[in-house]
Image (cartoon, grey):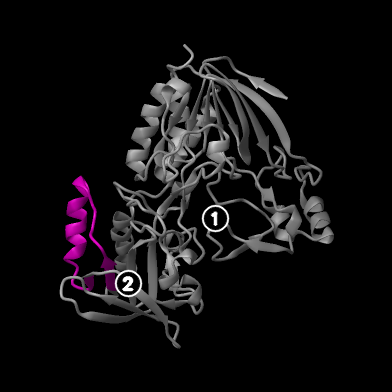
Amino acid sequence: MSDTAGNGAVLVVGGGISGLTAALEAAEVGNDVFIIDKNPYFGGRVAQLNQYFPKLCPPTCGLEINFRRVKDNRKVRTYTMTTVKSVSGGPGNFEVTLTTAPRFVNSNCTACGDCAEVCTDEIDNAFNLGMNKTTAIYLPHEMAFPRRFVLDKDACSADCLEAIKGACKYNAVDTEMQAETFTINVGSIVWATGWDPYDATKIDNLKPESSPAIITNMMMERMAADNGPTSGKILRPGDDKEIESIAFVQCAGSRDENHLEFCSYICCMATFKQMTYVRERYPEAKIYVFYIDLRTPGKYEHFREKLMNDENSTFIKGKVADIISEDDGGVTMVAENAVTGAKIKQKVDMCVLATGMQPALGAQGKTLGVNMDGNGFVISEPDKGMIAAGCAKSAADVYTSTQSATAAALKAIQIGR
């Protein structure tokens, strides 16, 4: 199969906020655009957030508008569960081979949910970072676009598959669906592949696997979200205790030659934002922040100042050396105050690791001819028809990512003309 839209067409790899922005900016000036995402939905990491800067908006604020614009624009062709297999040619005349994995649910799906009601097999909920379970046929999340279920066929028994197929009134469940490989011809490629949270289990001294009370900042986002695994309550995993104290550990894996050498830029702001989640729900909870230094550039300085003046919050300049699990489900933070030299042991109900942003494209990028720096970020090469956007280019917040994506679209539409 081949899908050709002309040499001025743009391929956007990644359907998060950066990819959506780049795709729409290019399409709305008349270019044909293909946008793909490896997930069964568009929206990327932003869809998983409870709120994002600068206005502390829920993800519905930006994503729903963009989804509507995509639906209304015939220039944009969308492909979920799709990855790049190969790239050949050059600027103005790329041939890209794409592979779409089987969803096992076709376009007849109305997202009525009848299939999920009869499904007896469960899987970890990937959208909620494994903090709860979902049925093996599921809507990825409540505002998923496209609004269509997806089936994890391998997780289902034969009896469960039969029940699911029998429950669907629209003949939407297709267990014989196969992977599909096809080629497209485009003039330029925008890499908006986003980021993954750094794997906290690699940070030996912080030992997240030693206690369910040690979570990551993205887990905190899902926990605080109304559509998250705890319906917005900040509860300690394991025993569901409502927290009375919490610690945040900054630079968990970032600025470390053994892990991520770079500053992930958003971690300090994310922690200040998550402090507001705690404070809204638990006004008297004690908050402890362990940091190397605090980076809240420009307009975020006032936000930081307000939270640092919180009487129930304590800031400790010093790296956490160890986290000790306690018998009552809590954890004790062990650190040295870099200012006073004092040894600190602080027991808390729960601990949040501010893990860094790792470029998601990974080693595959080099096999596709993408130029990347030593940290794995994509280097834009407009003369070669390859342009980076958002967190594929550098660690950035949502606002900066959308600016980057707009710039990437402007470069992309000039190639091949």
| Quadrant in the picture for the N terminus | top right
Q: Is residue 375 above or below residue 214?
A: above
Question: Is 152 left or right of 327, judged from the image as shown?
Answer: right
Q: Which residue is mark 1?
A: 127
Type of amino acid at the residue the image marks with label 2: Val
Badge 1 density bin: few <14, some 14–19, many ≥20, Cα 10 Å: some
**Residue beneath the point at 53% across and 59% down:** 128
Numbered range of the magenta stretch: 287-315
Q: How many discs appear?
A: 2
Q: Which residue is mark 2?
A: 320
| Res. 231 visible in picture | no
| Res. 44 visible in picture | yes
Q: Is residue 32 above or below residue 393?
A: above
Badge 2 density bin: few <14, some 14–19, many ≥20, Cα 10 Å: many
Instruction: Provide residue 99's location: percent of width, then percent of height.
Output: 67, 36
Q: CA distance from mark 1 to mark 2?
A: 29 Å
Instruction: Give the SS element for disc 1.
Output: loop
Instruction: Answer whether labels 1 and 2 touch (C-beta < 8 Å).
Output: no
Instruction: Provide residue 130's location: percent of width, then percent of height.
Output: 56, 63
Which quadrant of the figure has residue 329? bottom left
* Residue sitting at the far bottom: 327
Q: Is residue 54 magenta?
A: no
**Residue beneath the point at 45% across and 57% down:** 198
User: Of 190 and 202, which appears nearest the observer?
Assistant: 202
Instruction: Provide residue 284's location: percent of width, then percent of height.
Output: 27, 75
Q: Is residue 296 magenta?
A: yes
**Residue beneath the point at 59% across and 40% down:** 146
Type of amino acid at the residue the image marks with label 1: Phe
**Residue beneath the point at 32% across and 39% down:** 400
